[in-house]
Image (cartoon, rainbow, N blue to C red):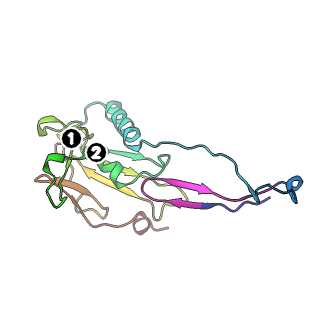
Amino acid sequence: MMYIFIRNEDNNIYIEYGPIPKSNKEHGKKNHRAIGVYGMHAKILNNVESLRKALKVKPERYGILDKPYLIAINAVDMLALDKDDVMDCLMGSTCIVPELITNQNAFQEFREHDGFFTGRNDKGQNTRVSAAMITKIHPSNWRDSDYWIFENEMAILPINLRNSSLITRFIQDGIIYRTSGKSFGDIIVY
């Protein structure tokens, strides 16, 4: 028997559902639903913490390097991973200060000092890492898969990827910038 599934996805949730016909023995009986329902598992995702754990393991593997060090993580198993998760992981969790909200409900976002690259007193952390590249590449989506590259402004051995053909994000004077660039599909020609 073939089922039709309906999928809905946004930044916060992914839902897949579909009608399941009643079994033959239930056909024609009164007071029975027209379709059956099975319960599915639900999961609360914490992609930021999963990504942080994956990033923290990598610098310890190779010791001290004398060249810029770019960490690459293929997070294909992290459902619904998006730009906000990556930004919160690398640059610090997004926050607002309630006391600074104006009468017009205008507010300014800040970043906590809990990011992989950010640390207390603006000294940064994981300074042996020059940049991080987070991807979601899978054989079925390589042409249009998401990727994020962030330079570590506090790196001991910095790397400048701003002129590469890839989309790169970097911090300059406390502002996060994004360069224009190409998708993997545009770069990888088969």
Residue for point 41% across, 44% down? 47
| Quadrant where the image shows the N terminus | bottom right
Q: 190 or 127: which is nearer to us? A: 127
Q: Quadrant of residue 106?
A: bottom left
* Residue 81, x across and y down, in percent: 42, 51
- Part of the protein shown in magenta: 7-22
Q: Which residue is mark 1?
A: 118
Residue for point 31% across, 66% down? 181
The three-letter code of the residue at mark 2 reads: Leu
Q: Is residue 146 visible?
A: yes
Dot 1: few (<14), some (14–19), or many (≥20) neighbours within 10 Å?
A: many
- Residue 90, numbered circle: 2
**Element carrying mark 1:** loop
Dot 2: few (<14), some (14–19), or many (≥20) neighbours within 10 Å?
A: many
* Residue 79, x across and y down, in percent: 48, 49
Is mark 1 in CB contact (under 8 Å) with mark 2? Answer: yes
Q: Quadrant of residue 48?
A: top left
Q: 179 or 90: which is nearer to us? A: 90
In this rendering, would 5 be left or right of 145?
right
Magenta-colored stretch includes residue 8: yes
Magenta-colored stretch includes residue 115: no
In this rendering, would 27 be left or right of 65?
right
Residue for point 50% across, 67% down? 190
Q: Is residue 133 visible?
A: no
C-alpha gap between disc 1 and disc 2 = 7 Å
Position of 8 relative to 135 (above/below): below
Q: Quadrant of residue 52?
A: top left
**Element carrying mark 2:** helix
* Residue 23, x across and y down, in percent: 84, 54
